[in-house]
């Protein structure tokens, strides 16, 4: 304990999280019993009633500074010994933990009234009660991580992103500092530079065939080792997995305590990875020149920095409003029609649920993100103008394959901003009125009348939509696998 004791205006011990009445009381009791003094003997020595001393020892009364000094003298000790002594013994520590639990939300919610923890209460009983309280807390946290909680977290985070035009200056600054530290000259970031960043952060890279299936990478912080799958090269960009793992270390992420915190960390990690792959200082002049030439292209940004189309599209949304003055929207849509990622600051009217969440909603079948799946030409980008209740929007989209099936990734702008982009001369046009159910969320009346009572589809619903989110601090990660993996691979 490192806190210091200072006098308050009332001459009492200050209300400090570290110097709390429970801890002080148990320390007094521990010193008293170590010296073989009874409660009555100590009370007589400081000229107080035994009941008053009992309340202090049980943490129910906060002692004044002068009384604490008198108690310390009577015990043949010092004030510092009470405030800054070694940790309490196991029994006292358990009693304090249970006292705090009884004052907490869980006990109150269960209607369990606080009770006195007497000497006759076995230590094993204290351990059992504390373990049960901890398990109830864990189960309550798991119940909080439901699809509804996930949607609320998504809505809150998207509002923050919209407020900042999806631009986070502190993350851009972190990226600049790392790139300067490894003398990156700008332009595409090579795999060797990714390894240099790892070395700069004190990590060596290790590619293994037995990486836990529920992970993209595993960092052994104690030994400075970063494990990645040796099969990574056949699955995607090897730089991305390295940089995503290192980004969490750069940002000092701790174990998330809520789904919202987990989601925020994931967004920050992806943002910083994009900022390292497509550096702001180099990409902004590139995009500004393209705007001057009226030739902005997500494909050109992708090719200039050797990244995936999705990474280029994400990065464009970070920089477009801030540096080009162009409001944008972004959509990632599964081949089933489900929206998996979304962002907008151009007032496009995406479908939402009652909580305002876009993720998980069905994308309008007339929208570019759905129409692109029907295109035979997957080599060239697909462009389309779409008339909506909020005006006309232009989008460019591509289909990319993943382990979860095909996804379309699209970036769009309002009609007035189309003049800055390649593909503005497209003749593709659609009309989307997804705010009206009959547009695509409900069948036309004649079809519904003919088939509603005469059909029964067997729904192919993704497993994750039928269950709560995976439990644990890192949703979806089997921590036993991770810990066993680290134990097996740690240097001996």
Image (cartoon, rainbow, N blue to C red):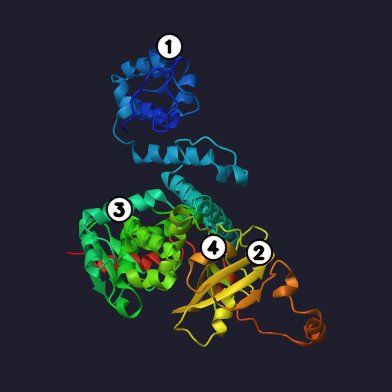
The numbered mark, 3 or 4, whose residue comes first in the sequence reads 3
Q: Gap in Å between the C-alphas at discs 4 and 2?
A: 12 Å
Q: Quadrant of the N terminus?
A: top left
Residue 391 - label: 2
Query: How far apart, in angstroms, are the residues tagged by discs 4 and 1?
Result: 83 Å
Residue 363, can we see it? no
Label 3 and label 4: CA atoms lie apart by 30 Å
- Mark linked to residue 417: 4
The answer to whether 364 is drawn above or below residue 33 in the figure is below
Residue 263 located left or right of residue 306: right
Which numbered disc, 3 or 1, marks the residue that appears first in the sequence?
1
**What percent of the width, then of the height, locates residue 161?**
50, 54
Pick whichever, 456 or 35, lies toward us: 456
Which of discs 3 and 1 lies nearer the camera? The answer is: 3
Q: Secondary structure at mark 2?
A: strand
Residue named by callout 3: 176
Q: Quadrant of the C terminus?
A: bottom left
**Which mark sits nearer the N-terminus, 4 or 2?**
2
Decide which of tag 2 and tag 1 comes sooner along the chain: 1
Which percent across, then down, holds residue 222? 24, 56
Foreground tag (2 vs 3) = 2
Q: Which badge, 2 or 3, is on the more N-terminal residue?
A: 3
């Amino acid at each position: 304990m490192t806190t210091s004791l200072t006098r308050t205006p009332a001459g009492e011990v200050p209300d400090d999280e570290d110097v709390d009445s429970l801890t002080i009381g148990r320390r007094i009791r521990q010193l008293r019993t170590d010296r073989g003094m009874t409660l009555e003997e100590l009370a007589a020595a400081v000229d107080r009633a035994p009941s008053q001393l009992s309340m202090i020892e049980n943490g129910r009364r906060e002692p004044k500074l002068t009384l604490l000094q008198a108690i310390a003298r009577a015990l043949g000790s010092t004030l510092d010994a009470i405030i800054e002594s070694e940790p309490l013994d196991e029994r006292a520590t358990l009693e304090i933990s249970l006292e705090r639990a009884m004052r907490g939300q869980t006990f109150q919610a269960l209607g369990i009234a606080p009770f006195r923890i007497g000497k006759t209460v076995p230590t094993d009983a204290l351990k059992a009660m504390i373990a049960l309280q901890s398990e109830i807390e864990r189960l309550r946290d798991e119940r909080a991580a439901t699809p509804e909680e996930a949607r609320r977290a998504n809505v809150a985070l998207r509002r923050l992103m919209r407020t900042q035009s999806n631009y986070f200056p502190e993350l851009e600054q972190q990226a600049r500092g790392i790139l300067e530290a490894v003398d990156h000259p700008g332009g595409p970031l090579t795999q060797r530079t990714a390894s240099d960043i790892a070395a700069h952060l004190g990590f060596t890279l290790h590619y293994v065939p037995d990486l836990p299936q529920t992970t993209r990478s595993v960092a052994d912080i104690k030994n400075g080792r970063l494990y990645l799958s040796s099969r990574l090269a056949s699955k995607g960009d090897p730089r991305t997995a390295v940089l995503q793992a290192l980004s969490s270390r750069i940002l000092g992420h701790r174990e998330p305590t809520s789904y919202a915190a987990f989601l925020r960390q994931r967004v920050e990690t992806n943002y910083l990875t994009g900022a390292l792959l497509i550096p702001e200082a180099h990409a902004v002049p590139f995009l500004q020149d393209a705007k001057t030439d009226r030739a902005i292209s997500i494909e050109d940004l992708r090719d200039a920095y050797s990244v995936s189309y999705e990474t280029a599209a994400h990065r464009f949304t970070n920089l477009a409003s801030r540096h080009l003055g162009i409001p944008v929207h972004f959509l990632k849509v599964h081949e089933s029609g489900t929206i998996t990622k979304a962002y907008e600051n151009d007032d496009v009217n995406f479908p939402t649920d009652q909580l305002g969440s876009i993720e998980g909603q069905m994308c309008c079948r007339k929208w570019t993100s759905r129409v692109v799946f029907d295109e035979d030409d997957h080599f060239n980008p697909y462009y389309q103008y779409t008339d909506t209740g909020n005006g006309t929007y232009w989008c460019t989209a591509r289909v990319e394959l993943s382990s979860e099936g095909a996804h379309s990734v699209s970036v769009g702008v309002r009609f007035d901003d189309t003049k800055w982009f390649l593909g503005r001369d497209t003749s593709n046009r659609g009309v989307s009125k997804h705010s009206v159910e009959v547009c695509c969320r409900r069948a036309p009346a004649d079809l519904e009348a003919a088939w509603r009572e005469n059909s029964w589809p067997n729904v192919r619903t993704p497993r994750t939509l039928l269950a709560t989110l995976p439990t644990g601090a890192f949703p979806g990660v089997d921590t036993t696998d991770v810990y066993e993996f680290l134990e097996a691979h740690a240097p001996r």
